[in-house]
Image (cartoon, helix red, strand yellow):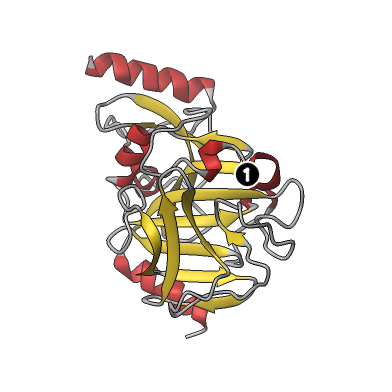
Amino acid sequence: MKSFHFLLLLALVKASAIPEITSPILPKSCLDYLHQGLTQNGFYVLVDNQGHPFMTYCDLSYEPGSAWTLVMSWQTAKFRDMPYFKTKLFTEDAPINAGSPNWFIYRETLARMKSIRSHSTHWRATCDINNLKGIDYEDYLRGRLGDLDILKWEGGRTCFPIDYVNIRGKAAGSGTTMAFWQVPNKYILHTDSTNTGCEFYYDANPIVDFFGFYGDGLSEEFRCSAEPDSTTQWWFGSYLSENRIFQNISQLLGV
């Protein structure tokens, strides 16, 4: 069975013009590719924890020293009312175009998300990354799975520490708390402009949502929803070393 999976993997690699693997070990995370010296963003083959191969999208260069796997992306305004991106939680299995990652309507299976999560230390949310040449950390959110495991937690307004956040230029660094919602049959994971009593919030009236749900409203000043074709993404990722995490955070905050 292992030999079959390996042959299938090689076939997928050749068919998709993916850089050839330099090791017979089947990669389980985008970080495995980064460890092999690959730094080109694009489509790669991973295997889940059961040894089954699947296609994914890896960001190997936008944040130096880290690798990120795309697990969800959608055209915010056009698809915000679809349950995949509005009411189906990260804790639920609600795939669409699974195994065929794209920017406009994509959500991986819960089983694959769990596999990717098990080889990750962080999650992040980005805006309109398909229209950017890189990440400038504006309208960007990153957290540690040890602080908030988005594949397990469900609840109403709750303050969690985050790694870094920037909403329309208002930013905060590691350990700052901000509010999240993820409620069954109501809200996918997101934050909004409510003054929650947490250390960080972005004030807007009427209320608008950030990085998901979008049922309260869209902000024309927020990159994920500024244009009709703007997109929202969620990722799991890891760093080559803890030093790269601290270095990146220090650079963002101007330390």
201 and 45: which is toward the camera:
201
Q: Quadrant of the N terminus?
A: top left
Q: Position of residue 176 (x, y in %)?
A: 40, 77
- Which is nearer the eye, 51 or 164? 164
The residue pinned by badge 1 equals 80
Q: Residues within 10 Å of mark 1 (few under 14, many from 20)?
A: some
Q: Is residue 22 visible?
A: no
Task: Find residue 226 and report its horizontal and vertical position in percent.
Answer: 73, 57
| Residue at x-position 50% and y-position 63% | 141
- Give the side of residue 146 with respect to residue 155, left or right: left
- Identity of the residue drawn at 49% across and 60% down: 63
Q: Residue furthest bottom?
A: 255
Residue that appears at 64% across and 38% down: 104
Residue 147 is situated, as x and y percent measured from the top left of the image, at 30, 64
Identify the residue at image location x=40%, y=69%: 162
User: Label 1 is placed on what type of residue?
Assistant: Arg
Q: Is residue 204 left or right of residue 115?
A: right
Q: Is residue 224 visible?
A: yes
Q: Hey, which quadrant is residue 249 in on the image?
A: bottom left
